[in-house]
Amino acid sequence: MAIQDIFAAVLDFEEDKIADMVQAEIDGGSDLEEVLNNGLIAAMDEVGAKFSAGELFVPEMLMAAQTMKAGLDVLKPMLAEGTSESRGTIIIGTVKGDLHDIGKNLVAMMLEGAGFDVIDLGVDVDTDAFLAAAEKHDADAICMSALLTTTMPAMESTVKAIVEKGLPYKAMVGGAPVTDAFAKKIGANYSEDAPSAVELARRLIAA
Ligand code: B1M
C-alpha cells in the first residue's frame, strides 16, 4: 500500500475502505502530513480539476468528499493532539451560501490541536450568527472559510460589521479562491492552509 492508493481510493469513492487504508499507512510509518497533503487533499484537487473539465459531476464530487471525510476522521485525533492549555477562543464557520466544509474542518482540527478553543458553527453561517457566537463565547477571533468566488463577499460583510460595531474580534479568512490581496482589501487576515491558519491565530491572538 502507498499514499498513491489513498489518492486513488478517494477518486474511486471507496468510502468504506479509506479509513483502514489511512490507518495502515500511518501504522506503516508514513508521515501524517504526507498522507493528508499527497493522499487526501491532492485527490480532492484532482476531483475539482475533473469537475472543471466536465469529467465528473456534483454527485461524484459529494461521494469523493464523503470518502475524504472518512479518511480525515482517522487523522483527526492526531491532528488535534496538542497542548491542553487554552490559547484563546476562535469562532469558525463556512460563510453564508457556501456548503463546503472539508477545509474548514481541517483548519478547526489543527487550531484545536494547537490549543485554541474552537467553536465550529458549521456551514452557511451569516454575519449575525458569527457575531452572536463571538459575543456568547467571548471570542478572540472569527475565522471564515469560503470555497466559492460568489460567497467571498459574505466575508466582507462580517468584517464590516466587526469594524462598524467596534468589536474586538480579529477576522481570519481563507479557502481556495481567497487571496492575501482580497483579505487585505476587506481588512481581514489571510492564511493559505490549515497549518498557516494556526500560525496566523498564534500571531493575532498573542498580539
Ligand atoms: Co464544490 N466547488 N461546488 N463541492 N468543490 C469547488 C470549490 C470548485 C473549485 C470545483 C471546480 O469548479 N473546479 C467550484 C468553485 C468555483 C468557484 O467558485 N471558483 C465548486 C462549485 C462550482 C460547486 C457548486 C456550485 C457545484 C454545483 O452545484 N453546480 C456547489 C456549490 C454548493 C454550495 O456550497 N452552495 C458545489 C458543491 C460541492 C459538494 C457539496 C458536492 C462538495 C463539498 C462537500 C463538503 O465540503 N462537505 C464539493 C467539493 C468536494 C468541491 C471540491 C472538489 C473540493 C473541495 C475540498 O474539500 N477540498 C472543490 C475543488 C477544489 O477545491 N479543488 C470544489 C479539500 C480541502 C482540504 O481544501 O477546502 O480548499 P480546501 O481547504 C484548504 C484551504 O483552502 C485552506 O485550508 C485547507 C487546507 O489546509 N482553508 C482555509 C480553507 N478554509 C480556510 C479558512 C482559513 C484559512 C485557510 O481561515 C483563516
Image (spheres, helix red, strand yellow):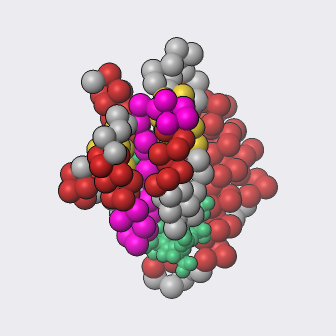
Going 44% across and 59% down the picture, which residue do you hit?
146
Image position of 84 with respect to 207: above or below: above
Give the quarter of the image for residue 63: bottom right
Using the rendered image of the protein, determine whether residue 4 is visible from the camera's viewpoint: no
Going 52% across and 14% down the picture, which residue do you hit?
85
Give the residues drawn in magenta, as a range. 135-154
Q: Report the side of 145 relative to 173 (left or right).
A: right
Give the quarter of the image for residue 78: top right
Magenta segment: does it hold 132? no
Image position of 20 with respect to 96: above or below: above
| Residue situated in front as seen by the camera: 37 or 95 | 95
| Residue situated in front as seen by the camera: 9 or 50 | 50
Using the rendered image of the protein, determine whether residue 19 is visible from the camera's viewpoint: yes
- How far from the left and from the top, in percent, is residue 38? 48, 50
| Residue situated in front as seen by the camera: 7 or 87 | 87
Going 47% across and 32% down the picture, which residue do you hit?
139
Q: Report the side of 67 relative to 146 (left or right).
A: right
- How far from the left and from the top, in percent, is residue 96? 50, 62
Image position of 66 with respect to 1: above or below: below
Going 50% across and 58% down the picture, which residue do you hit?
126
- How far from the left and from the top, in percent, is residue 177? 36, 63
Quadrant location, the C terminus: top left
| Residue situated in front as seen by the camera: 30 or 40 | 40
- How far from the left and from the top, in percent, is residue 101? 56, 55
Q: In the displayed image of the protein, which residue is found farthest to the bottom?
A: 54
Give the quarter of the image for residue 25: top right
